[in-house]
Each structure stands twice: as C-alpha cells, then as structure tokens.
Image: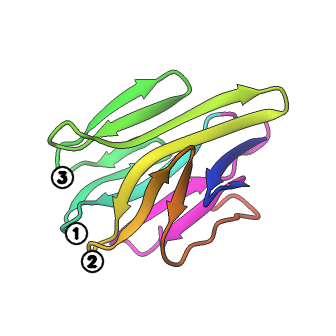
Amino acid sequence: MRLALVNDRLTPGFVIGDPQSGQGFYFLADLLLPGQDTPLISARLVSEKGDTLLELRSNKIADNPAGCTYQALPRGFRIFDPSSEPLLEVVTQDFPRGHLTRIKTRLFDERGDLRVESSGESIQVHGEANLVLDAPFN
C-alpha cells in the first residue's frame, strides 16, 4: 500500500480543490490500483499571484504556460518553476509493509492563498480538502 503524510497523518490518497472545475488550483494524489506503486499526481498549480504555472495529469505535464521544468527522479519527480526554484517534489520510499510518498512543496490557490506547505516529513493542508479518498478519483 502506498501512503502519504498529510497533516502529520498517513493517507492513501487525497484531493485539494476541484479537479473537474476546468480552472483554478487543485492537487490530487490519487489512490493506486493493485500492482501500482508509483504515486499518481494530477494538479493545476498557480503562482502566489494566481497565475497558472502548469497542469499535471498522472505525473505528466499537460499544459505548461509558465515554462516550468520537469525532472524525473528514481521513484518520483521534481518540478521547477520558471526561475528554477523547486515547485514540487514527489518521491516514494519502500518499506517492509508498503510505500511512503513524501511531497515537498508550497502551493497557492488562484486567490494567492497558501493551500499546501511542507512541514518536516509531512505536508500541511490549509483550507477545505478531502484528506482520505475511499476510491480512485478517476
């Protein structure tokens, strides 16, 4: 089982914002199906000013108006903003009883409000979110 640390608790998947809205910030760490061990991240990331930076669908850049850079990592990936500062890092580690995905980031919504930030080994989510998915989102 793959888990992530969110608000200092383990969760199999979570969603912040509305991925189906077609606009605005969202971040989805989807549940994995049996046999999968790579985290599936989809997101629409925006700058602190509310400008769209990129859209990520199942770990692949789908739209990149700001010219962000994607770097593949063993068991994860890293995305850099246009000024080459790290925007998002997702890495999974294996343990005897499962997998733990660690996320490092600082994310804002379209109004410029802080929604997600790294805190130690966890991320802290600010505002409304579904922090435990019961079934795959897609």
- In the rendered view, tell whether residue 11 sits above or below residue 98: below
The amino acid beneath tag 3 is Pro
Badge 3: residue crowd in 10 Å (few <14, some 14–19, many ≥20): few
Find disc 1 in the rendering and name its residue. Answer: 50
How far from the left and from the top, in percent, is residue 33? 74, 45
- In the rendered view, tell whether residue 41 sits above or below residue 108: above
Direction from residue 8 to residue 26 in the image, left or right: left
Residue in the image at 41% along x and 26% along y: 72
The mark that comes first in sequence, 1 or 3, is 1
The mark that comes first in sequence, 2 or 1, is 1
Q: Are marks 2 and 1 in contact (CB under 8 Å)?
A: yes
- The quadrant of the rendering that contains the N terminus is top right
Direction from residue 12 to residue 114 in the image, left or right: left
Among the 4 quarters of the image, the one containing residue 55:
bottom left
Q: Are marks 3 and 2 in contact (CB under 8 Å)?
A: no
The amino acid beneath tag 2 is Arg
How far from the left and from the top, in percent, is residue 111? 27, 77
How far from the left and from the top, in percent, is residue 31? 68, 52
How far from the left and from the top, in percent, is residue 35? 77, 34
Element type at marker 2?
loop
| Span colored in magenta | 11-37
Element type at marker 1?
loop
The mark that comes first in sequence, 3 or 2, is 3
Q: Is residue 108 magenta?
A: no
Q: Is residue 16 magenta?
A: yes
Give the alpha-carbon distance from disc 1 to disc 3, as whole Å: 13 Å
Per the picture, the main secondary structure of the magenta-coloured stretch is loop
